[in-house]
Image: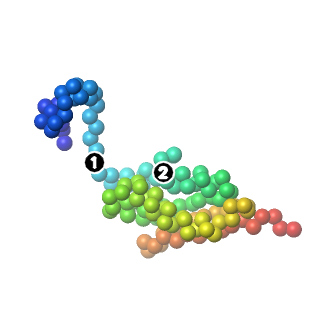
Amino acid sequence: IEQSPMRLSNHGFLPELIARITTVATTTKLSEADFVSSLDLERSSPIVQYQGYLRHFGYALNVSEEACRHFSRNAFQGTEGMRGIRRQLDNVLLPTFHDLDFTGFGGVIDITCTDRKIAVHLVENRGPTH
């Protein structure tokens, strides 16, 4: 929707404020593909943030493409946006955190999706054997 300064003043904005606005940004609803591509963004992706957190404890986090599409599909259908993807990851990973040995040798956490069902697989490193 194109907004002109006159239309903004009709909605109660003060002319002094309108004169200071230099950029008008328009937004559209994100598509499911937009959500999937945003999961690859460094620093802002909840997956990348979890990977960085777990790396400190020696764990690697792998999320399959199908799982990313599943999370994105649910976020697209909801109203929470990327917060919805974070919430889904929290719900999937937090129960797994209770099983992690943060004092051990780390391991690998795989999140997969088959038939629209998310599965978490944890493989912990056992350390050196003598």
Q: Which residue position holds label 2?
A: 45
Query: Which disc is residue 55 wearing?
Result: none
Q: Compared to 22, does 66 lie above or below?
A: below
Q: Residue at x 48, y 47 (%)?
A: 44
To which quarter of the image does residue 95 belong? Answer: bottom right
Rendering coords of residue 101 (x, y %):
69, 65
Residue at the image position 57 percent from the left and 60 percent from the top: 62
| Drawn side of residue 79 relative to residue 125, left or right | left
- Image coordinates for residue 100, horizontal then vertical, percent: 65, 66
As displayed, is residue 27 above or below residue 70?
above
Q: Name the secondary structure under disc 1.
A: loop
User: Dot 2, crowdedness within 10 Å: few (<14), some or many (≥20)?
Assistant: some
Would residue 94 be seen by someone viewing this image from the given angle? yes
Q: Is residue 56 left or right of residue 90?
A: right
Circle 2 — which element? Answer: loop
Can I make out residue 4 in this image? no
Specify the farthest residue to the right.
130
N-terminal label among 1 and 2 = 1
Amino acid marked by disc 1: Thr
In the rendered structure, which amino acid carries the disc numbered 2?
Ser
Quadrant assignment for the N terminus? top left
**Quadrant for the C terminus in the image:** bottom right
Q: CA distance from mark 1 to mark 2?
A: 20 Å
Residue at x 19% of width, y 30% of height:
14
Camera-side residue of 80 and 30: 80
Q: Which mark is residue 28?
A: 1
Crowd band around label 1 with a 10 angstrom C-alpha radius: few (<14), some (14–19), many (20+): few
Describe the colour scheme in one phrase.
rainbow
Residue drawn where x is 37% and y is 55% of the image: 81
